[in-house]
Image (cartoon, coloured by chain):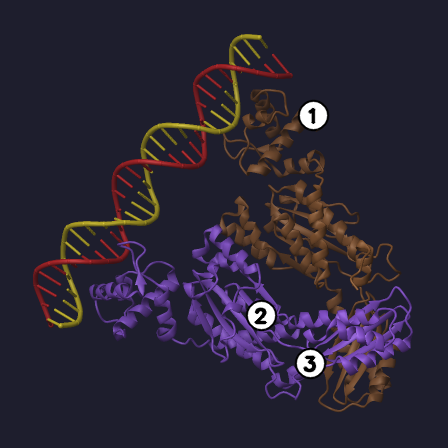
Chain colours: A purple, B brown, C yellow, D red
Amino acid sequence: MAISDRKKKILAAVVDEYIRTAEPVGSKAIAQRGELKCSSATIRNELAELVALGYLEQPHTSAGRVPTPMGYRMYVNELMERQKLSLEESEEMNLRLNQKLQELDDTIKDVSRLASQLTDYPALALTAQSSVTVKRYDLIYVDANNFIIVLMLSSNAVKSKLVHLPVSADQELVQRLSTLFNASFTGLAEAEITPVKIHAAERAADDQLGLTAVISAFVLETLAEANTPTAFLSGENRLLNQPEFRDPDKAHKLMSYLSGGGTILPSAEGMQPSDEVRVLIGPENVAEELKDSSVVIASYDAGDNTRGLIGVVGPTRMDYSAVAAKLSFLAAGLSRRLGGGEAPPEGLHNKLIIKEIDDGHERR
Amino acid sequence: MAISDRKKKILAAVVDEYIRTAEPVGSKAIAQRGELKCSSATIRNELAELVALGYLEQPHTSAGRVPTPMGYRMYVNELMERQKLSLEESEEMNLRLNQKLQELDDTIKDVSRLASQLTDYPALALTAQSSVTVKRYDLIYVDANNFIIVLMLSSNAVKSKLVHLPVSADQELVQRLSTLFNASFTGLAEAEITPVKIHAAERAADDQLGLTAVISAFVLETLAEANTPTAFLSGENRLLNQPEFRDPDKAHKLMSYLSGGGTILPSAEGMQPSDEVRVLIGPENVAEELKDSSVVIASYDAGDNTRGLIGVVGPTRMDYSAVAAKLSFLAAGLSRRLGGGEAPPEGLHNKLIIKEIDDGHERR
DNA sequence: TATTAGCACTCGGAACGTGAGAGTGCCAAC
DNA sequence: GTTGGCACTCTCACGTTCCGAGTGCTAATA
């Protein structure tokens, strides 16, 4: 099974060249690269064997060779030189990371945008499933017909909402409910907040206006939202840059699959404990629609013991090396900025803190 | 300038047919539709004149006719039969509207998705610029190192955030600041919250920990966010369904323009006081990239004296009639659900209320 | 035994030519 | 003013030809 050193070099050359040009590569082209000190004839022989072994294939007799998924796999596993980003590149990326994250933190959205821009492939980001609970309830009495619900979640996110009542409520009731919820509904998972408990609370607080129902509805909704992994897709149109997607039908199929949501990289999720980058080549993907595309995924620490994923989708002829390097840099950068790390006991998304860790000087 | 009745009918027929088939339409095809009781020869004569008048053009001699932008304009203005949605269609739409809006209200996002799904063109939704102010401040003391800022905006939206302090603050200070902000910073526009005022407040509250700065930063950020119109684009890939975008380059150009954000329909904004639908045909668009596409826009009442826009982008050969009907229905539906209307004095996004207006029966 | 040079062969794709068909414009007749 | 007829035009689809890139094989070489 182990193949000769020279074969590896040749395989690597084919993949490199094919990634670059998107055209089948011939023996002559490899010989001319000068890395191997042998003639095109020798290379031809080796190529023929690589085809026999299944690493390469020919679109037709008398065309150059093209890597098979197996060939790419070998390339990714052993051959590819772990690309280091140039200094400019990494500075550029850092810069944009900072910019992005500083403005408004629609994090996932920005992350996927950034990934897409950097790699020039469609990218998507998603947050991991978590199990957030409510840590603290506050009800702010505004006037007889309005009060504000404020929920502080275990992730330290804060959600709030104004509730308008068709009937008048007195301040005491609101106060009572606030105490009650804090006493009985903190730390409960979404599933634990049952209609039974809600009903019990309603009676306990002597709530005849249905406020308990309104509040718990908001709580449930909020928890559901916070616990549902959300995905964000960017730069789908970049697919059209790739020659393999010049066929609008092909492109459209993949694009609508991607924007159709969910089932994208989650399939490849879970097996991502390390901070390494993962590559799924063509048929290695579970989804039918991705069978002749590749996916590169990196995971980052999103704080709150949560890991997010960034993935990039492209043709199998993808610049794995560059994409992997960029994604892993991006993931590392995000982890540093968002992740708990050595930050204060309760990792917060506080801008001030981010800046401190970041470069030490604040603005005011 | 006024053209004969028969010419109009013929023009309408050409546009209809062309919209349907995407192919130049010939005299025979029109004659066969049976609406006109004359022969193809007569129609040929009329067609020739319509070409001379600038309503139609020929891709080449001996090809059928294709409408010019001017032809479409005429069609849209006078000829097009205001399509009524079928009963099923409108019920379907109502259904989806309800579904969509009930779950979580990422309104713009959902609106654009919906519009895109319904019309099968890329759609984008955006919120109008507004001038929101803070109506009420609440600071919730959590512990010495943490407090929550809750802002109630003039739009009745509520924004909140947990602030973590590297130093300890006492409850009184937080209380003091709360009072102070409510006294001096309510109803101020973003621009009116100047560093000077902030500084003054800081001194007035005897705040040595910089809380004032943190709070006002959040306020400014929140106001900026609330006042910035946001846009959301959906279904860009649907462009690829259209034969005129089978050329990947063309498609890519338009798609990246669209996803490039901002400058899309805002150009056509502002002149939209009525609830009518607006159509911009080809060169009528200001943006270079849209010069040979068309845009259909409807505006809806998003509550808070704010109007949102929904727009759809497609080839000039777009089914204006259907799209216009759908968009206007959608806009009307949204206005009904989101808009102030006869709703309580302060239009709220309260789910309960929506449901009441909607169909009268609630769930609990 | 591994490498190389040479050569005949294959095959895809560009270039070209051809023909069919759709549609026109115009004319003469109604 | 309308209609049928007819010659003309132009595109598109199809088939043929031709070129060249790249191969596989063989024989010569180190």
The N terminus of chain B lies in quadrant: top right
Residue A337, horizontal then vertical, whole percent:
60, 80
- Tell me the quarter of the picture where residue B349 sits: bottom right
Say which chain tag 2 marks.
Answer: A
CA–CA distance in space, label 3 to label 1: 71 Å
Q: Amino acid at mark 1?
A: Asp
Tell me which label, 3 or 2, sits earlier in the chain: 2
Say which chain tag 1 marks.
Answer: B
Mark 3 on the same chain as mark 2: yes
| Tag 3 secondary structure | loop
CA–CA distance in space, label 3 to label 2: 20 Å
CA–CA distance in space, label 1 to label 2: 58 Å
Relative to B95, is B292 on the left or the right? left
- Tell me the quarter of the picture where residue B233 sits: bottom right
- In the depicted structure, whether residue B110 falls above or below residue D12: below
Circles 3 and 2: CB atoms closer than 8 Å: no
Residue topped by disc 1: B5
Q: Amino acid at mark 3?
A: Ser
Say which chain tag 3 marks.
Answer: A
Residue B114, horizontal then vertical, whole percent:
66, 54
Q: Amino acid at mark 2?
A: Leu
The residue at 76%/69% (across/down) is A217
Residue topped by disc 2: A126
Residue A154: numbered disc: 3
Mark 1 on the same chain as mark 2: no
| Tag 1 secondary structure | helix
Q: Nearer the viewer, mark 3 or mark 1?
A: 3
10 Å crowding of disc 3: few (<14), some (14-19), many (20+): some
The residue at 66%/28% (across/down) is B9
- In the depicted structure, whether residue B363 falls above or below residue B316: below
